[in-house]
């Protein structure tokens, strides 16, 4: 029996960023179950689809990534959240990590670097939860 694919929600207000991340995730064998262009939609789609991983932009309309992160973690603090940012604003990144994000990605990184960060973060996450619900390969 094949293990199920890692289910992912991508939330970013820039369509080309969502498309690039969708491509990378597909190449890693993950399944993108939903996409959102704003924070409110991201939280609603998270509740609806219950993905294993969320890639969440910090700067989004309606509800910023920080608030969306807090709401997602309040629903399930075991969800793997990776923040996306166009700026290297370390104070904001630290706040996101303090509120439950597992890692962050600078959007200016190459596709290869995005792939590497996503893959490494997922593998670390799976090692931590191994033996529990949701431990699948990517």
Image (tube, grey):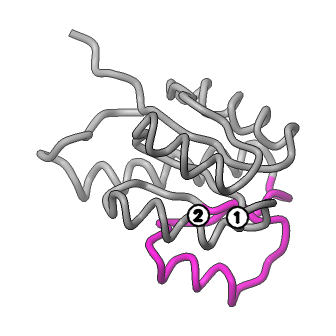
Q: Is residue 124 left or right of residue 45?
A: left
Measured along the vertical axis of the image, is residue 6 above or below residue 117?
A: above
User: Where is residue 99 shown, x and y percent of the image?
Assistant: 47, 78
Frontmost residue, 77 versus 71? 71
Q: Which residue appears at 26% of the width and 53% of the height?
A: 127
Q: Residues within 10 Å of mark 1 (few under 14, many from 20)?
A: some
The span shown in magenta is: 83-109
User: Where is residue 9 shown, x and y percent of the image?
Assistant: 56, 40
Residue 101 within the segment the image draws in magenta: yes
User: Where is residue 121 shown, x and y percent of the image?
Assistant: 47, 55
Q: Which residue appears at 51% of the width and 77% of the height?
A: 97
Q: Are marks 2 and 1 in contact (CB under 8 Å)?
A: yes
Numbered disc 2: secondary structure: helix
Mark 2, residue position: 68
Residue 22 within the segment the image draws in magenta: no
Measured along the vertical axis of the image, is residue 87 above or below residue 20?
A: below
Q: Residues within 10 Å of mark 2 (few under 14, many from 20)?
A: many
Mark 1, residue position: 63
Frontmost residue, 11 versus 135? 11
Q: Is residue 79 left or right of residue 14?
A: left
Most extreme residue toward the top, as rendered?
Answer: 1
Q: In this figure, what is the number of numbered marks?
A: 2
């Amino acid at each position: 029996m094949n293990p199920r694919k890692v289910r992912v929600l991508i939330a970013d207000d820039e369509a080309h960023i969502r498309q690039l991340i969708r491509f990378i995730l597909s190449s890693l064998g993950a399944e993108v179950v939903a996409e959102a262009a704003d924070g409110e939609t991201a939280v609603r789609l998270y509740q609806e689809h219950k993905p294993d991983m969320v890639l969440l932009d910090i700067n989004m309309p309606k509800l910023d990534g920080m608030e969306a992160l807090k709401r997602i973690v309040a629903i399930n603090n075991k969800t793997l959240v990776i923040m996306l940012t166009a700026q290297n604003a370390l104070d904001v990144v630290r706040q996101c990590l303090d509120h439950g994000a597992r890692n962050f990605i600078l959007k200016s990184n190459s596709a290869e670097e995005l792939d590497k960060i996503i893959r490494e973060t997922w593998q670390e996450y799976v090692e931590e939860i191994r033996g529990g619900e949701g431990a699948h390969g990517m």
